[in-house]
Amino acid sequence: MSKIKFNINRKNITDEQALKHKSFDKVMAGYKAMNTPLYKTFKFWAGAGIAVTTVVVATFLFINKQEKETELAVKPPIENLDIQNIHFSVDASRDTVLTTETGSQIKIAANSFVDKNGNPVAGIVDIEYREFHDVVDIFLSGIPMAYDSAGTNYHFESAGMFEIHGFQKGKEVFISEASPVNILLASKQEGERFNIYKLDDKSGDWSFIEKDTAGRIGEDGTYGEIKKEKLLDSINDIIVELSLNKLAAEALVAQLIIEKPIQPKKLEPLSHNLKIEVDEKEFPELALYKNLLFEIDKNDKAFKSELSKIVWDEASVKKGKQQGTYLLTFRKGKDEYTFLTRPVVPEKDFPNAKELYESMFDEYEKTLSKRKADEEKKKKELEAEYAKLMADRNAQIAAIAQRMATESAQRSAANTTTDIIYRSFMVSSFGIWNSDCPQNMPKGLMVSAKFTDKKNNELIFNTLYLIEKGKNAAYSLTNYDYSRFQFNPESENLLLGVTKDNKIAIFKPEDFAALGKIDLSINFKMQVIDKPFKNIEEVKSFVDI
């Protein structure tokens, strides 16, 4: 925990500690890619008859983590925009096949339903059923898509999801253990990487049921599994990994350039200055010099001496836009003041500080030169490996495309009109079922995120998802601290959320592209939709998925 003291003073401040030489590599080893603000409570006071006002800041541990309880229920984020049920009436004593508009089939054998006591149900049973096929369906459903396995958190990439329930005269019925319902869910996703899961509607947790299968329904109405073949998933993952390694090499050089040693400046005799003692792990570049002071910019009109008499609720420190500047912000209620400052040293310490800087700068130049050479070598190695993998991948894609075209032509010649992929479920109990592949958060650069609307008003979210186009997965950021997350800059990304005042907010792929070079700290200026959407199709058209 860092200790910080602010001394607002018009006189030079002395300190008995000698200036000690520090290794640049040691300082860089303590560097974090993310410098989070220091949040503090503190109190100002002034002694009677003393012209110097001293500010002592007591720090508290700011735990940058949101502790959220497990989702206990499905909670659609936007009222009246939930996926609606379709209704069927079936005779419980007869074999029945129901077909939905998407082509999904619900196969119910005779005597498949029982009451709460396990007794067979006769007569008409009302079936409620709905499906979820894309990230907008998932987003609007409010169904939790996080999965915990052996203490590791995953996010689901979905090949399709459905919810089914049965009722008779308003009372819930159940599926007999001896006669599960077979559901062939129409899916837009090929591949063997998916599993079948069922949601516990009380805890919000998913249970693994079994490995799923993908198939088609032939002319005779029977279901058959698709011929298994080598998938591209592993090679695609390697290609992504190589791209990220290249980005990481570039980021190391960019990071080092940002952390260029700050040339010391002498304290102006009549300036307002603040003494700051900080943990070098939080701000390593500030720990290079002892007796370091922060001088308030003489052109900063916001500073007034009377502000030192206020007992502030909160303070934060962060880097300014210009290298070598820092912004100190004080808050109390709705009042907020931010001052531009620069690090300086007293005149008596300046010779030692200058000597230290020159030594540090020489070491910095050597380190930077070596890191650039390493980056160039690594980039060439990665580009060669990347080119080989891309060639292999393109050859596989061409072969698969040719096979699929041949099979499609054969089905057309045989007048087979159905070319739908199905996921087969043996449903033993009513509820929400999913064909999913657990995914980690996208690999990429970790960023410190701030979210505002186009007018720079801060946004707070009930729900916020990171979505990669081309992958049917919505990564929930509100399960964690969404002020820090990582994304893959090589992917086509978008952010989709619901604000505290229940408005949809979006940061589109073109907004990501407009960011240009990715910084470690990003203000995502999101488009907030004030006008309510009339239906789900309007949302899908707007999101363009």
Image (cartoon, rainbow, N blue to C red):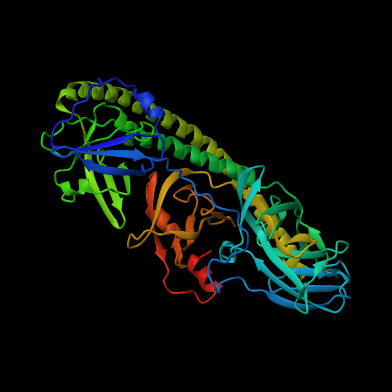
Between 200 and 314, the one nearer to me in the picture: 314
Give the quadrant of residue 451.
bottom left
For the question of whether residue 198 can be seen, the reply is yes
> Does residue 486 appear left or right of residue 415 in this picture?
left
For the question of whether residue 300 can be seen, the reply is no
> Does residue 474 appear left or right of residue 508 in this picture?
right
Q: Quadrant of the N terminus?
A: top left
Q: Residue furthest left?
A: 270
Residue lying at 61% horizontally and 48% vertically, measured from the top left: 154
**Image location (x, y in percent) of residue 166:** 76, 72
Between 162 and 401, the one nearer to me in the picture: 162
Residue lying at 28% horizontally and 20% vertically, measured from the top left: 20
308 lies above or below 377: below
**Image location (x, y in percent) of residue 362:** 28, 22
Give the quadrant of residue 93.
bottom right
Between 99 and 454, the one nearer to me in the picture: 454
Residue lying at 88% horizontally and 69% vertically, measured from the top left: 119
Give the quadrant of residue 276.
top left
Query: Total of numbered circles in the picture?
Result: 0
**Image location (x, y in percent) of residue 536:** 55, 72
**Image location (x, y in percent) of residue 81:** 55, 72
Q: Residue furthest front?
A: 48
29 lies above or below 314: above
